[in-house]
Image (cartoon, rainbow, N blue to C red):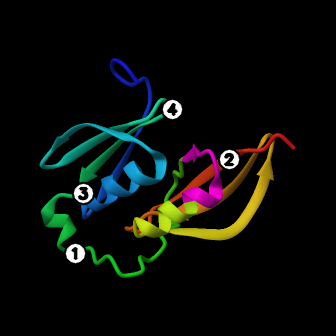
Amino acid sequence: MSGPARAGMFVYAKDMERVAAFYERVLGMRRLQARDDLVVLASPDLQLLVHAIPSEFAADIAIQTPPVRRHDTAYKFFATVPRLDIAGEAVAAAGGEMFDERWHGPGFVACNVMDPEGNVFQLREFDAG
């Protein structure tokens, strides 16, 4: 992705580095910029900004192991990967969870995934059949 992104998404994280490393590994994103409170990641399809939750709020947040799924949010993004089974291995290795249920949409197979802090998003792979 060259130049400023036309669209992207923020993810707020208690452990910014762990969450950024998760998305780098699972989505094959590259780190464009990092500072104490923000990591900017990019792929050809998406710019993802992982922002540290301010310490005065983060002190009241407990991230359990395994993380508790956050399903009370109004937004959920999706990203396409070459193969869901390979992405699932990366998800588990990076501290997340891929859920078992898969479904077919027009030209894709999808499943939900949770990052190490419980944020749920969807992974898709193209399905020619």
112 vs 28: above or below: below
Q: x, y percentage for residue 121?
A: 53, 56
Q: x, y percentage for residue 125?
A: 68, 47
User: How far apart are labels 3 and 4 at the CA level?
Assistant: 21 Å
2 and 3 marks in contact (CB < 8 Å): no
Q: Nearer the viewer, mark 4 or mark 1?
A: 4
Quadrant of the rendered image containing residue 85: bottom right
The residue labelled by disc 2 is 125
Residue at left offset 43%, top offset 23%: 6
User: How far apart are labels 3 and 1 at the CA level?
Assistant: 19 Å
Q: Is residue 22 magenta?
A: no
The residue labelled by disc 3 is 17
User: How far apart are labels 4 and 2 at the CA level?
Assistant: 14 Å
The residue labelled by disc 4 is 45
Residue type at mark 1 is Asp
The residue labelled by disc 1 is 60
User: How far apart are labels 2 and 1 at the CA level?
Assistant: 37 Å
Locate the C terminus and report the quarter of the image it occupies. Answer: top right
- What crowding class fits label 1: few (fewer than 14 Cα within 10 Å), some (14-19), or many (20 or more)? few
Which stretch is magenta? 78-87
Q: x, y percentage for residue 58?
A: 21, 67
Residue nearest the observer in this picture, 69 or 21: 21
- What crowding class fits label 3: few (fewer than 14 Cα within 10 Å), some (14-19), or many (20 or more)? some
Locate the N terminus and report the quarter of the image it occupies. Answer: top left
